[in-house]
């Protein structure tokens, strides 16, 4: 599943344009949850770390051991971002209430 | 063979769906009404992508993956449950974790592949580890300053910009050498260590008031480094997620810089603190200010028909948001129209004040942006400033010699009466004197924000029971 350079650049360019258009529309009211949500999504880097940690067995070959160790630490870091990021984003969004129909 | 092809295609399809869900997630975040659906879409995409990855045929050892996923979850849960006032440092910390992940994977990929690396691959790999390393230490420094375990005061020294730019230039030169000669593997550690040092040096001169811009910038770097990792691993999903995060951080950084009327380079290389010594001392002792008690303040507020409250970092420090909410309730009950004016850089990260006020149950349609509020202020009876300073300083409009001249501010001085809750007459974070405090229509309310608002609340509710 290797991509060639040009395809990668196309994907990056299109995603960046979509990102700009979508995120420009996010109300400043929600800029803190925006940051914590994008941070959680960014932690999708965990998929790279999983493959790295899984493909290399710890053992005799120092290169493989290094890859497995670094990959494992990377999974821990990314997973804590995923879990923490989603929890706190949802907690924040739950607090935003309109003064409209239901008032306590 | 067929079977293997099938698994690969299935993995790619989960990534494709995850990418779509990520974009939808951000799209739904645009309004509070649909925002929680956005979080759900993000979670679904994430779960799908991780499940798909575990099908990867090359994975030979699941034990450490399982342990790492559990450990990450154990660390992540408390990080998701921090108090709302701690959100800025939590955010900085999570940028550091993201950058750590990216840097470690980049390092492993380099040693697995070198010296057999194409120039393009080495270029993006260098970008990945340079951005990752500097974001790692930079974010840790920012988190430390926000958590107040490190001195918050900007630290500046002669030749600082020269040192910082020099460190950055050296990292880029090393990257250049490695692109041409990937066999010079001994250079690689330097390409990590020097940006790590740069990250620290970059944040040393940053003061609290600049934190919103810096956190946004670090957010952007974290996203770009993840996108670079996507290039290295050939993962479209990662390129997309990184590009979205990078775009988000970039937009926020531009917003924050505009709201401070400063350029990126000025934030990073222009430490505000340097301007302090001249502005602070002297003359202001001579000028007189008027002050008022909670009783008087409550009387003025109760007699008003339109009140705008301008919160700042001081409100967060004093944890006054819940008392503010009680005051809001009492005033609203009396028929006073109360809204909140939120400056984009109020607090320590973008949107910080909105989250604190929402936590205190203030309806979000009362939280207005700067432009909306500035239109209203001339018709406002009372502008109540709680723990904000520089964002209300009229010198930004009038005094060309002021360091904040040109910065868009909330024009509270145009309201009929201005009341400012402040601990003392000490200058604000930027160390700039605020002429607002000496205006004829300004009343200073000296005291801790929480106690003072509490006093106003007591007075307002007392008045209720009498009448």
Image: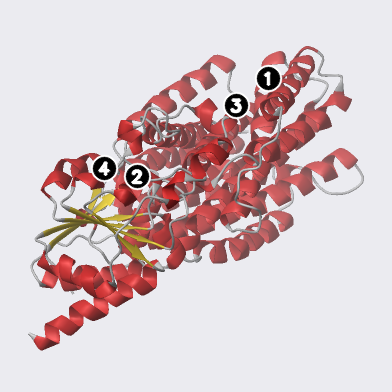
Chain of the residue displaying label 4: B
Outermost residue on the top side: it is: B180
Q: Is residue B84 left or right of residue B162?
A: left
Q: Are marks 1 and 4 in contact (CB under 8 Å)?
A: no
Chain of the residue displaying label 3: B
Question: Which color scheme is applied?
Answer: secondary structure
Q: Inspect this view and state whether residue A103 appears.
A: no
Image quarter in which the N terminus of chain B is found: top right
Outermost residue on the bottom side: it is: B466
Question: Viewer-nearest of labels 1 and 4?
Answer: 4
Query: What residue does disc 4 label?
Result: B370
- Mark with earlier residue (3, 4): 3
Disc 1 is placed on an element classified as helix
Query: What residue does disc 3 label?
Result: B231
- Mark with earlier residue (4, 2): 4
Query: What residue does disc 1 label?
Result: B123
Query: What residue does disc 2 label?
Result: B435
Q: Residue at x 71, y 14 (%)?
A: B119
Q: CA distance from mark 3 to mark 4?
A: 40 Å
Image quarter in which the C terminus of chain B is found: bottom left
B68 or B9: nearer the eye?
B68
Chain of the residue displaying label 1: B
């Amino acid at each position: 599943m290797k991509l060639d350079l040009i395809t990668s650049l196309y994907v990056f360019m299109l995603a960046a344009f979509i990102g700009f258009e979508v995120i420009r529309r996010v109300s400043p009211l929600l800029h803190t949850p925006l940051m914590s949500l994008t941070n959680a999504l960014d932690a999708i880097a965990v998929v790279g770390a999983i493959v790295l940690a899984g493909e290399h067995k710890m053992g005799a070959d120092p290169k493989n051991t290094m890859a497995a160790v670094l990959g494992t630490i990377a999974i821990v870091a990314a997973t804590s971002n995923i879990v923490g990021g989603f929890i706190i984003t949802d907690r924040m969004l739950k607090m935003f209430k309109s003064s409209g129909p239901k008032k306590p | 063979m067929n079977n293997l092809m099938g698994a690969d295609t299935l993995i790619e399809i989960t990534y494709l769906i995850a990418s779509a869900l990520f974009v939808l997630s951000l799209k739904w975040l645009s309004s509070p009404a649909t925002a929680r659906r956005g979080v759900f879409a993000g979670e679904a995409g994430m779960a799908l992508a991780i499940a798909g990855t575990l099908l990867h045929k090359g994975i030979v050892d699941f034990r450490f993956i399982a342990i790492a996923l559990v450990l990450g979850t154990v660390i992540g849960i408390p990080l998701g449950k921090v108090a709302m006032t701690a959100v800025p440092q939590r955010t900085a910390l999570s940028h550091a974790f993201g950058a750590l992940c990216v840097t470690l994977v980049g390092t492993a990929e380099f040693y697995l592949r070198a010296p057999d690396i194409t120039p393009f691959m080495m270029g993006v790999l260098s970008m990945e580890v340079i951005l990752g390393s500097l974001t790692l230490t930079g974010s840790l420094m920012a988190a430390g300053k926000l958590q107040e375990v490190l001195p918050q005061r900007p630290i500046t020294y002669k030749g600082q910009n020269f040192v910082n730019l020099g460190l950055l230039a050296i990292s880029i030169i090393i990257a250049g050498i490695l692109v041409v000669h990937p066999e010079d593997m001994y250079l690689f550690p330097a390409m990590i260590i020097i940006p790590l040092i740069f990250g620290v040096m970059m944040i040393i001169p940053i003061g609290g008031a600049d934190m919103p811009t810096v956190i946004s910038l670090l957010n952007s770097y974290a996203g770009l480094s993840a996108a670079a990792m996507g290039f290295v691993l050939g993962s479209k999903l990662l390129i997309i997620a990184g590009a979205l995060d990078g775009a988000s951080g970039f937009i926020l950084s531009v917003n924050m810089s505009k709201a401070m009327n400063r350029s990126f380079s000025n934030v990073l290389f222009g430490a505000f603190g340097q301007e302090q010594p001249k502005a602070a001392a002297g003359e202001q002792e001579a000028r007189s200010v008027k002050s008022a008690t909670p009783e008087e303040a409550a009387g003025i507020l109760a007699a008003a028909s339109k009140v705008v409250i301008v919160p700042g970092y001081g409100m967060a420090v004093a944890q006054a948001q819940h008392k503010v909410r009680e005051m809001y309730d009492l005033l609203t009950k009396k028929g006073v129209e109360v809204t909140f004016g939120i400056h984009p850089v109020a607090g320590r990260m973008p949107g910080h004040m909105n989250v604190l006020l929402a936590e205190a149950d203030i309806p979000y349609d009362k939280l207005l942006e700067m432009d909306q509020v500035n239109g209203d202020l001339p018709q406002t009876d009372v502008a109540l400033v709680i723990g904000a300073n520089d964002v209300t300083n009229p010198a930004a409009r009038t005094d060309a010699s002021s360091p904040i001249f040109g910065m868009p501010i909330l024009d509270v001085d145009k309201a009929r009466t201005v009341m400012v809750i402040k601990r003392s007459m000490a200058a604000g974070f930027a160390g700039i004197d605020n002429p607002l405090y000496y205006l004829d229509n300004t009343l200073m309310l000296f005291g801790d924000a929480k106690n003072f608002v509490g006093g106003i609340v007591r007075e307002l509710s007392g008045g209720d029971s009498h009448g």
